[in-house]
Image (cartoon, rainbow, N blue to C red):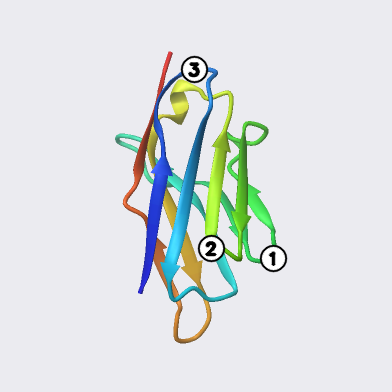
Amino acid sequence: QVQLVESGGGLVQAGGSLRLSCAASGIISSPNVMGWFRQAPGKQRELVAISTTAAMTQYADSVKGRFTLSRDNAKNTVSLQMNSLEPEDTAVYYCNLKQYRLGSAGDYWGQGTQVTVSS
């Protein structure tokens, strides 16, 4: 099994910064995709930023230039640096890991961490 433990999040004023971190433990295999999704009240969960083990990174258009995703494959961690936060970024942020190797394939989620940006 895989466990994802998130940290960070909280309340910040518009224009401020926050950093989210996620550590994966258990049976971690490559290749995989690890990153962050978010879900605002009344909205569907959406991709924020993801990164592959080959260091290819994808960002949602709404966060490009403001958020930076970094990962450490050796430690199975991923972090999301969020700058210039806007009230529209308010959501529960979920860490996600997708694995594809036969025998350990799966789609895993963290428990979620609240990010609230006040105007």
Q: Which residue is mark 2?
A: 76
Q: CB under 8 Å between callouts 2 and 3? A: no
Question: Helix, strand or loop at disc 1?
Answer: loop
Q: Quadrant of residue 38?
A: top left
Q: Is residue 13 left or right of residue 1?
A: right
Q: Residue at x 69, y 59 (%)?
A: 55
Q: Is residue 33 left or right of residue 117?
A: right
Residue 20, given in percent of the width and then of the height, sits at: 48, 41
Q: Which residue is mark 3?
A: 14
Q: Residue at x 41, y 44 (%)?
A: 7
Give amino acid for label 1. Answer: Ala
Q: Earlier in the sequence, mark 1 or mark 2?
A: 1
The crowding category of the residue bearing disc 1, from other C-alpha atoms within 10 Å (few below 14, some 14 to 19, many at least 20), is few
The tag on residue 54 is 1
The crowding category of the residue bearing disc 2, from other C-alpha atoms within 10 Å (few below 14, some 14 to 19, many at least 20), is some
The residue lying furthest to the front in this view is 75
Q: Residue at x 56, y 69 (%)?
A: 32
Q: CB under 8 Å between callouts 3 and 1? A: no
Residue 17, given in percent of the width and then of the height, sits at: 53, 26
The residue lying furthest to the bottom in this view is 103
Give amino acid for label 3. Answer: Ala
**In the rendered image, which quarter contains the C terminus?**
top left
Task: Relative to 73, say whether 100 is above or below.
Answer: below
Question: Helix, strand or loop at disc 3?
Answer: loop
